[in-house]
Amino acid sequence: MFTNKCLAAFVALGLTVGLSASVSAATPHGSDGHAMELRLDNGQKWQTDEALRTRMGRIRDDIDTALPLVHAGRYGAADFSALADRVQEQVDYVVANCKLPEEADIQLHLALAQVMDGINVMKGEGGQEQGVAAIVQALNAYGGHFDHPEWKPLGDR
């Protein structure tokens, strides 16, 4: 179950982003029309908790395992759908169990919105590789902005 703070932040972010199936629309926009980007906490990475680190690590591992097959063109529609379901399960857990301060929570939801876009693209018809690419970008942004010891960015294979 969502906490009220997490639910409110996620709903507000969802309305801002639109959670469209288009990867190009994955970047939220502020009221002035400029893209909202992840930012650091006064030059430092945002704090994380165990639940966040564990579940983001699982998403990273699932995507890392899939990347060679995706790049080799050996990932079919059923594979993309199953991967999307696994990633969605982890995102749902993170959102339901977030224990971050409000500012960190807002930043996390910016990254999660791009993951959600990637999930939507992977469940669509055609171009599912772009969904994986969106999730890779979101995971790398997460690693650059959140204190997650031993996080390794995903590279292009």
Image (cartoon, helix red, strand yellow):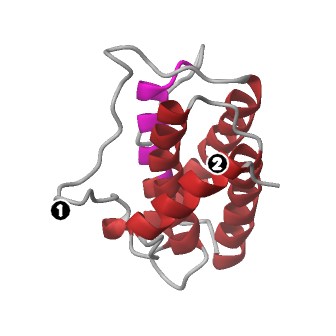
Left or right of 100? Residue 17 is left
Q: Nearer the viewer, residue 137 or 1?
A: 1
The mark found on residue 13 in the picture is none
Residue 22 lies in the magenta stretch: no
**Residue 91 against residue 14 in the figure, above or below:** above
Q: Main secondary structure of the magenta part?
A: helix
Lower sequence index among marks 1 and 2: 2
Which region of the structure is painted magenta? 135-147
Q: Position of residue 32 (x, y in %)?
A: 16, 58
What amino acid type should be assigned to the residue bearing mark 2? Cys
Residue 136 lies in the magenta stretch: yes
The residue located at (40%, 42%) in the rendering is: 156
Q: Dot 1: within a 10 Å radius of its alpha carbon, few (fewer than 14), some, or many (20 or more) residues?
A: few
Q: Quadrant of residue 119?
A: bottom right
Numbered disc 1: secondary structure:
loop
Left or right of 154? Residue 78 is right
**Residue 8 against residue 94 in the figure, above or below:** below
Q: Quadrant of the C terminus?
A: top left
Residue at the right extreme of this rendering: 1
Residue behind mark 1: 33
Q: Quadrant of residue 145?
A: top left
What amino acid type should be assigned to the residue bearing mark 1? Gly
Numbered disc 2: secondary structure:
helix
**Residue 60 against residue 149 in the figure, above or below:** below
Residue behind mark 2: 6
Evaluate whether residue 64 shows in this view: yes
The residue located at (58%, 29%) in the rendering is: 101
The residue located at (70%, 32%) in the rendering is: 99
Q: Contact (CB < 8 A) between labels 1 and 2?
A: no
The residue located at (38%, 21%) in the rendering is: 41
Q: Disc 1 and disc 2: Cα gap in Å?
A: 24 Å
